[in-house]
Image: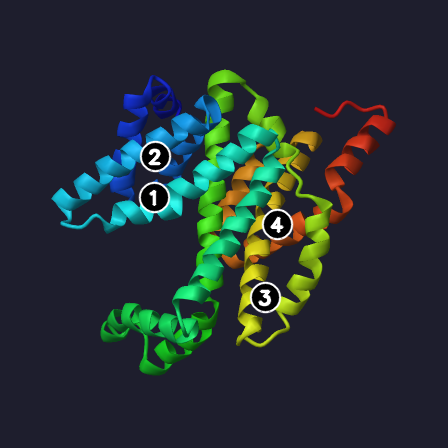
Amino acid sequence: MRWLASYVMQGRRQAVFAVTMLAVLSWNMSLVGILNAAVIGLVALRNGPNEGLITVGLALLGSALLGLIVLGDMAPAFATFALVWTPILLVAIVLRVTRSLATAVQSGLLLGVAVILAYFAVMQDMVAGWREILETFSKPLVEAELLTGSQQTDLVDTLAPWMTGILAAGLYLQLMAGLLMARWWQAMLYNPGGFRQEFHNLRLNRLLAYIAAPVLVLGFNTEMSGAGLLINYVAVLLVAAYFVQGLAFVHGIAALAGVNRGWLIAMYVLLIVALPNMFGLLFAAGYADAWFDFRARFQARGKAGGGSID
């Protein structure tokens, strides 16, 4: 990906072109949205908020025009502006100003809460709204006899109450992936090795762990109705945040212990093939590390033993 980062840093015209094209591609390939966000993040981190705003503004004009020509609709461009470009620009500015990756990761939580509150404001009955959407999307599976009618009903009833929280967490993780990639690109071009150290030391504020404790306990022991919905959705968002810390924790411990990189590759393979279990395990590791700071303890033990931990 170095070539893309280098191309974007050649100038405003190149950055706007890359952002616009990646936005159009992301309308059919959602994972391209991470690259799209990373480009905006890199511009803001390296060239500042003003250049980031100009790049976003020009890319919005370009993608809206392309959307009108290709799809006859400018809505996808404005959706990308609201859900991808604006959040990454904000967290990148936070990172540039504070120079704290943890602060930027935590600021993303506020944007996730904003998404949840927006859904509460827009949708009068979120669960019913999601049930209707899920029934529409799962209907082809029933017609293809991949699901029975009763299985469809059970699936929709299970997922519908959680969908707003899942959506907010998904957008948050995409935002974090874009931010981390942007920071990696910046380090790769201008500060080799800097991102590795920064990511390995990523640890969210202890105060957030105190706040998360009652939210997580209440969230998973509260009925999915009324205020219980909001608590559960915030709990899901916090799980996503500590999943990010869990990844940083595993990378940091692996580096301190000097283990083979193959173990990290195995972790990501397991994350793909056993997503729910590995996601939960990494969340638990991240949340435990928030309390006990295992990396600092491991490093201190290595120094006390006279060993060299690189």
Which residue carries the number 3 mark? 231
CA distance separating discs 2 and 4: 30 Å
Amino acid type, residue under disc 2 in the picture? Val
CA distance separating discs 1 and 4: 27 Å
Q: Quadrant of the N terminus?
A: top left
Residue 105, placed above or below residue 131? above
Q: Secondary structure at mark 1?
A: helix
Residue 259, placed above or below residue 127? above
CA distance separating discs 3 and 2: 33 Å
Please name the residue shown 50% across and 49% down the image.
111
Which residue carries the number 2 mark? 56
Q: Which of the numbered marks, if any, corresponds to residue 81?
A: 1
The picture places residue 90, in percent across and down from the top left corner, at 48, 39
Picture mark count: 4
Q: Quadrant of the C terminus?
A: top right
Does residue 72 show up?
A: yes
The picture places residue 281, in percent across and down from the top left corner, at 62, 54
What is the image's colouring?
A: rainbow
- The answer to whether marks 3 and 2 mark residues whose Cβ atoms lie closer than 8 Å is no
Q: Give the mark nearer the N terminus: 1 vs 2.
A: 2
Q: Give the mark nearer the N terminus: 4 vs 3.
A: 3
CA distance separating discs 4 and 3: 17 Å
From the image, state whether disc 3 or disc 2 is nearer to you: 2
- The answer to whether marks 3 and 1 mark residues whose Cβ atoms lie closer than 8 Å is no
Amino acid type, residue under disc 1 in the picture? Phe
Amino acid type, residue under disc 4 in the picture? Tyr
Residue 39, by quadrant, is: top left
Which residue carries the number 4 mark? 242
Please name the residue shown 41% across and 74% down the image.
125
